[in-house]
């Protein structure tokens, strides 16, 4: 999810100046005379998962023949379906449904007059009100999502990356080949091979678009996600780069693919990973950097906080305070202190007098995220170190409404660093009305991502497809 950096930063900001959360007190009284079987089936609601993002949740309740209850939970915006519930209790209209996998669940009561469940969603230290209406989720249409039959071959594949096994999908044009090929590299967070996000499947769309142009495409479940093995808690940009190298090696091993024509397409942090791979592999044929950083990780986070605060309507003084607080936090996170000392200093910044137990738990969760291996590595990493060594053709694309990786400073830095180190085969595109996911947007705020039907702007799909085809023909 290209959100890991921004949400870690926002979590720290929210602890320092917490939003009003729903009280975990008693939900409304249940309607009298209700019998449990009336509650079977799907129940759908929306939670506010931070200041900018809403997530649909679907609770499926099933009454067994012996009178007990079971259930599952869907988070369709995140592509997580059928999450098992360990405990489901339904009695006189009171519903409690919890999942150890999610470290939380729903507690509420049925209101007959409104035909809805009303209560609280809890997950770790996070709590918010949740109203569930009877019926399945009415999701936004995604008209660009490809569906079979496909005019190309689709193959599920597995290959090693060190001691883990990565699983993905390889799409191959019809014919004998050998074909040029692209490895798709997602942004921060844990992603399945389609990079499912808010119901969109951008990597499935990219694979379809490019394979129809005669380019083989490999897209992969992140380690510890989907069918790939590995421990997701130990992931950093470095381990992601190792996995990308394994993907390149696999593509080069396939007889249908020309090993001299394998390139990389990375989105957000995936662009940084593409730089890390291409810097030390002169055989990489090209890289495509979509909404990717050209500045160090700590500067990316500071820019995110400032841009999101301004776009959300905060006053200049509030914006300044948010940036100052974030800079203090980042100085600790990227500093040389060991975890214990860094934790002590972060507690001093994030704690406040008379802090409630809930907010204290939020502070602890924030510190855990800030001191995770991925976050500490990211804020200490400077993409320019790797860009200076990239010799292959580069296409860098960003949107003018990107509030997570600011287009102008990052694109300018990518172009400048490559040129200063002798790489003049560089194309830079900044498209004015596109957000971080390269959708045509209104504000660029992350809250719009799931409300937009478009998965990727057609202009971006066309520009990237044409650029790869032209550069491959030139080779």
Image (cartoon, rainbow, N blue to C red):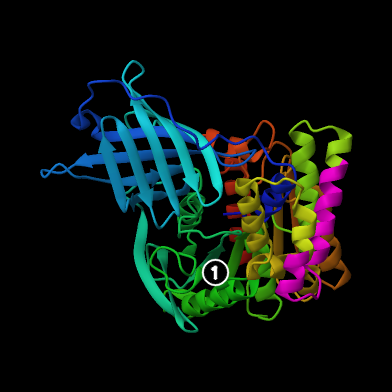
Instruction: Identify the magenta region.
Output: 320-344
What quarter of the picture does the N terminus occupy? bottom right
Looking at the image, which residue is at 53% across and 67% down?
A: 183
Q: Residue 323 in magenta?
A: yes
Residue 460 is left or right of residue 57, and the answer is right
Residue corresponding to mark 1: 233
Q: Which of 308 and 462 is in front in this view?
A: 308
In the image, residue 204 sits, relative to residue 77, either above or below, namely below
Residue 198 placement (x, y as % from top left): 50, 43
Residue 116 is left or right of residue 354, and the answer is left
Task: Decide: few, some or many residues near mark 1? Use Cα within 10 Å; few <14, some 14-19, many ≥20.
Answer: few
Q: Nearer the viewer, residue 251 or 455?
A: 455
Q: Nearer the viewer, residue 279 or 33?
A: 33
Task: State whether residue 469 appears in this view.
Answer: yes
What predominant SS class does the magenta segment belong to? Answer: helix
In the image, residue 228 sits, relative to residue 105, either above or below, namely below
User: Furthest residue to the top?
Assistant: 113
Residue 246 placement (x, y as % from top left): 52, 78
In the image, residue 395 sits, relative to residue 230, either above or below, namely above
User: Furthest residue to the left?
Assistant: 65
């Amino acid at each position: 999810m290209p959100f890991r950096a921004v949400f870690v930063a926002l979590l720290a900001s929210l602890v320092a100046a917490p939003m009003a959360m729903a009280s975990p007190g008693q939900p409304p009284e249940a309607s009298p005379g209700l019998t449990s079987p009336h509650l079977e089936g799907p129940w759908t609601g929306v939670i506010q998962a931070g200041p900018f993002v809403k997530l649909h949740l679907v609770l499926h309740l099933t009454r067994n023949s012996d009178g007990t209850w079971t259930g599952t939970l869907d988070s369709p915006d995140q592509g997580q379906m059928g999450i098992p519930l360990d405990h489901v209790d339904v009695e006189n209209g009171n519903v409690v449904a919890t999942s150890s996998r999610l470290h939380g669940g729903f507690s509420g009561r049925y209101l007959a007059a409104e035909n809805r469940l009303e209560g609280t969603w809890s997950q770790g230290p996070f709590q918010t009100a949740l109203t569930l209406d009877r019926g399945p989720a009415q999701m936004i249409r995604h008209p660009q999502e490809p569906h079979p039959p496909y005019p190309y071959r689709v193959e599920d594949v597995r290959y090693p990356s060190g001691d883990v096994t990565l699983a993905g999908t390889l799409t191959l044009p019809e014919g004998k080949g050998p074909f040029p090929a692209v490895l798709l590299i997602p942004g921060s967070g844990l992603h399945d091979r389609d990079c499912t996000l808010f119901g969109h499947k951008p990597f499935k769309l990219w694979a379809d678009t490019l394979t129809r142009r005669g380019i083989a495409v490999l897209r992969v479940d992140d380690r510890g996600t989907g069918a790939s093995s590995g421990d997701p808690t130990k992931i950093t940009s470095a381990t992601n780069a190792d996995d990308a190298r394994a993907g390149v090696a696999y593509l080069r091993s396939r007889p249908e693919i020309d090993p001299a024509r394998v390139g990389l397409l990375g989105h957000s942090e995936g662009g940084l990973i593409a730089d890390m791979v291409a810097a030390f592999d002169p055989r990489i044929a090209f890289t495509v950097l979509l909404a990717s950083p050209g500045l160090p990780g700590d500067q990316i986070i500071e820019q995110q906080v400032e841009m999101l605060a301004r776009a959300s309507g905060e006053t200049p003084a509030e914006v300044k305070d948010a940036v100052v607080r974030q800079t203090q936090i980042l100085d600790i996170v990227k500093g040389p202190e060991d975890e214990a000392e860094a934790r002590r200093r972060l507690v001093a910044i994030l704690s406040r007098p008379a802090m409630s137990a809930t907010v204290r738990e939020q502070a602890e969760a924030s510190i855990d995220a800030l001191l995770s291996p991925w976050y500490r590595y990211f804020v200490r990493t400077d993409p320019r170190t790797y860009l200076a060594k990239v010799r292959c053709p580069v296409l860098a694309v960003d949107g003018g409404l990107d509030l997570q990786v600011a287009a102008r400073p990052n694109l300018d830095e990518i172009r400048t660093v490559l040129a200063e180190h002798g790489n003049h085969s560089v194309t830079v595109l900044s498209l004015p009305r596109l957000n971080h996911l390269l959708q045509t947007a209104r504000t660029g705020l992350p809250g719009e991502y799931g409300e937009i039907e478009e998965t990727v702007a057609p202009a971006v799909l066309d520009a990237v497809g044409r650029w790869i085809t032209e550069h491959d023909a030139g080779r």
